[in-house]
Image: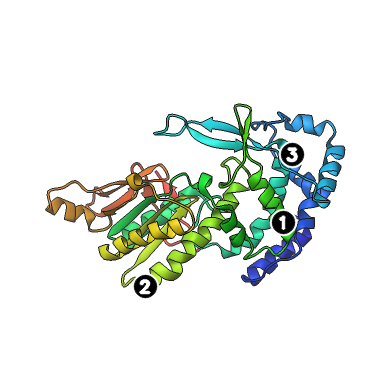
Amino acid sequence: MSPNLARRGEKAKAYPTLVFTSLYHHIADIEHLRAGYQQLKGNTAVGVDEVTKSMYAAALEANLQDLSARLQRMGYCPQPKRRLYIPKPGSETGRPLGISSFEDKIVELATKRVLEPLFEPLFEECSYGYRPQRSSHQCLDALGRTLQQKRVNILVEADIRGFFDAVHHEWLLKFLRQRIGDERVLRLIRRMLKAGIMENGLVQVAEVGTPQGSILSPLLSNVYLHYVLDIWFQRRIRRHCRGEAYLYRFADDFVAGFQYQMEAEDFLESLGKRMQEFHLELAPEKTRHLEFGRYARANAYRKGEKPKEFTFLGMTFFCGKTRQGALHIAPYGRTFDTSPLSSGTRSLSG
């Protein structure tokens, strides 16, 4: 990262409400574009133009100079993304991806490198997906320790139907304006969002959504759900709860834990309305609340029932007991390190 970008990152941490008005020249800078080119791998799927990294490198300096010049005069237009499907459990068609052309990947990465330091200081502790020094294992670990050690009795599972394909462009741009005052950057992002998808030789113009597969999409999705979900939960839901309440989110997957059932039910009802306000929809078949926590096992057995389980980030959590008879809440085949660490981060073992 260049010294200027590093200084902007430090400034962003120091002033959380500051709006940056001069950013675009960093994206268009040829050295910044070259750094993005070097960071990209050469064995990834190609876009609609079928240009690979080695093909682009054949005339690298001329290509980078031309790209920088087009960006500077606002003459750069992203190509449509190539539709590709990868296997997805429970889906016959698979998970849809949008594969950018190699040159578009350079611009997406350059844009991400400029914007990420501005928004990172704003993101809540509950957000773990696609962030520096954060991982799904840390999210699972923190969730497991909360379930085992805190006053959580009711868990809310929720699923946003087709989130990446439903992101509302105008709302997203409003959220980005909380940090970005450079209209050229917003115009560039709008062009990326509107570039469309090519499938079976036909281009479909994108009115909503930010395609999975794009380098910039994870950051944009975090920005969207930061304002739609994270700060709403922390500042509205949690503050009005009599009992304890916790949220854990990894990209568009999230769960919330509550001490009292009534507050969990109120949250679930409010959540549906909140999603609709921002053009999102909960999948009813994947959205529920269930008894889960330190007392769920004993309560279930008193009722003659089996303790409930839930799956988050591919791991199924259950309430059990260790050989010594102590309470044990963790994904199958995993245990949590609950020793106090100064960093505040514990790892999964087992």
Regarding residue 293, the answer to whether it shows in the image is yes
Res 313 quadrant in image: top left
Q: Which residue is mark 2?
A: 240
Pick whichever of labels 3 and 2 is earlier in the sequence: 3
Residue at the (74%, 45%) spot, across then down: 36
Relative horizontal placement of residue 158, taking residue 251 as reference (left or right): left
Q: Is residue 170 left or right of residue 4?
A: left
Q: Residues within 10 Å of mark 2 (few under 14, many from 20)?
A: few
Dot 3 falls on a residue whose secondary structure is: helix
Give the residue number, with chain letter if any, for mark 3: 103
In the rendered image, which residue does mark 1 sit on? Answer: 185
Q: Residue at x 46, y 65 (%)?
A: 232
Q: Secondary structure at mark 2?
A: helix
Front position in the image: 296 or 186: 186
Q: Secondary structure at mark 1?
A: helix
Q: How much space separates mark 1 and mark 3, taking CA atoms?
A: 17 Å
All told, the count of numbered labels is: 3
Q: Are marks 1 and 3 in contact (CB under 8 Å)?
A: no
Residue 188 screen position, x and y as percent:
71, 51
**Residue located at (62% from left, 30% from top):** 202
Mark before the other along the chain sequence, 1 or 3: 3
